[in-house]
Amino acid sequence: MDREPRAEVRATIHEHLAWWGLKRFTSDADYFVWQRKQLSPADLTQLNAQIDRKRGGERRDEVAFYDLTTQPLMLPVLYSQRYEYYCEIGSHVAARFGNANSILDFGCGVGILSTFYATQYADRQFVGVDRSPASIAVAREKARKLGLTNIRFECVDVESENLAGAYDLIVATHALVQAEQDPGIPSHSWQTFERARDAKQQAAFEQRTGIGIRLDRLRASLAREGRMIVSEKTRQLARRVPFQRALAGRGLQPVEAPKPIHYQLVEEVADDGPFYVLGRGAPQQFQWDESPEPDAGGPFDRNNLKTDSTDPDAPLYENHWPSAQRVWEKLHDTHLLKETTNQGPDGRQLHVELGQAEEGVYLYCANTLDQRQLVIVEPARMVMLESYYQEIASSVL
C-alpha cells in the first residue's frame, strides 16, 4: 500500500477541480471579490441565513444547507473555499486504495472526490452516499458527464436506514462528527490531560455528535478484511480522545501511524485531527495516542528570557500550548499571590493563578478542555497580569 501522495496524483486533482469549476485562491480579498461577482446580494443573504440555521444542529437544516449549495452558481463559489482540503485529503486517500475492489465514499456530497477516485481507478467499483438529495442528483449528473461507469450514487441517511452491501474500503472524511462546536469530554481536572473511561460520558458524546449510529452502520458494511479511512475535525484532545475510543470500541485499530492533516482555507490554516487508516480487528501494531500533540512551545530556558526585546509590551515568556504546563511546573521558588478555580455544572474546570517566581511574575491558566497558558513578565508590570487575572477569574464556564 502506498503511504505518501504522489506528485502526479496532486497534479491530476488540480485538473479535476478545474473541471468542476473550482478556483484556487491565496488571498481572502481576491476570493470575496470573485464571490460577489458570481453571487447576487439576494444569494448571499439566503446563504448566510441557511448557514446560521445549520449551526443549530438540526438534521433538516443541515440537509437544506447542502441542498442549497448545489445551485449552479453557488457550487463552485462555496466549494472553492475547500480547494486545498480536496487536494490534501484526495491525494492521501488515493494513495491508500491498495487491493480494495469495492469502495464506499460516505458523506460524498456532490461527488467531487468520489468522481476523482473513480477516474483514477477505472477497474474498481465505487459507491457514494449522502443524505442530501440535491447533492446526489448533482453527483450523478457529473459522473454521467465524465463518462464514469464504475460509480453510482445513492441518497441514504444512515441515521434512519442501513447501508446495502459490503465494502473492501470505506472512506469517511468530514462526515462522521457533525457537531463541530461540541467541546468533547473534559479531563479529570485542570491539572491533567487524562480522561476517565466513563461509559455514560462516551455514549453521550457519540449521541451528541451523531458518530455512534454512523460508525455502527459503517462497520456493519465493512468486509471482514476491510479497511476504513477516516479524517475529522478532532484535533483538540477533548474531541480526539472520545473519537478514538468510539473507533476502538467497534474493533477498529490503526494499521499505520495516524498523521495530522494541514491545509489552507484561502488565507487561514486548517489543522484537522489525525488521518486514520483502520482495520477491522487488525493487530494492534499502532497504539491509540491520548496525549497532547507535540506543540510549538519549545524548550524553556530561564537564562534566555526576552529581556532585550524592543517591544515594551512583550512579556519575558509566553506559551499558549500544552507544554506551558511543564514549564509552569518547573518554575523556581514560586510564591502564590492569587488563585481561582471555577467549576461549571457539567464538571468542567477553569483554573487561573497569579504568582511570583525566580523567573518573574507569572500568570498561569488551565482548563479541563486542555487549554494552557503561561505568561511571565518583570515584577514592575504586575498590574498588567493582575488585570488579566481578574478578567479570566470572572469568566463563566
Image (cartoon, rainbow, N blue to C red):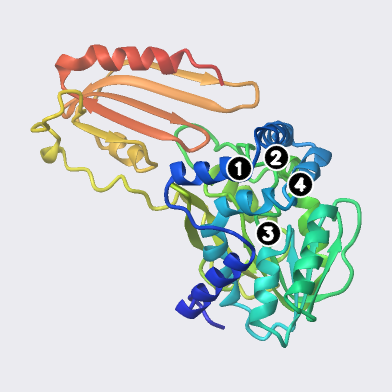
Instruction: Identify residue type, mark 3.
Output: Leu
Q: Going from the N terminus, do you reach mark 1 or mark 3 first?
A: 1
Q: Is residue 277 left or right of residue 210?
A: left
Q: Going from the N terminus, do you reach mark 2 or mark 1 first?
A: 1
Q: Which mark is residue 100?
A: none
Task: Note whether 98 is above or below 31 in the view shown.
Answer: below
- Quadrant showing the N terminus: bottom right
Mark 1, other Cα within 10 Å: few <14 / some 14–19 / many ≥20: few
Q: How far is mark 4 from mark 3, CA to CA?
A: 13 Å
Identify the residue at image location x=47%, y=12%: 394
Q: Is residue 2 left or right of residue 115?
A: left
Identify the residue at image location x=56%, y=50%: 81
**Residue that numbered label 3 is attached to:** 247
* Residue 321 in view here: yes
Q: How far is mark 2 from mark 4, CA to CA?
A: 14 Å
Q: Secondary structure at mark 1?
A: loop
- Quadrant showing the C terminus: top right
Q: Going from the N terminus, do you reach mark 2 or mark 4 first?
A: 2
Labels 2 and 3 touching (C-beta < 8 A): no
Q: Secondary structure at mark 4?
A: loop
**Residue that numbered label 4 is attached to:** 210
**Residue that numbered label 2 is attached to:** 201
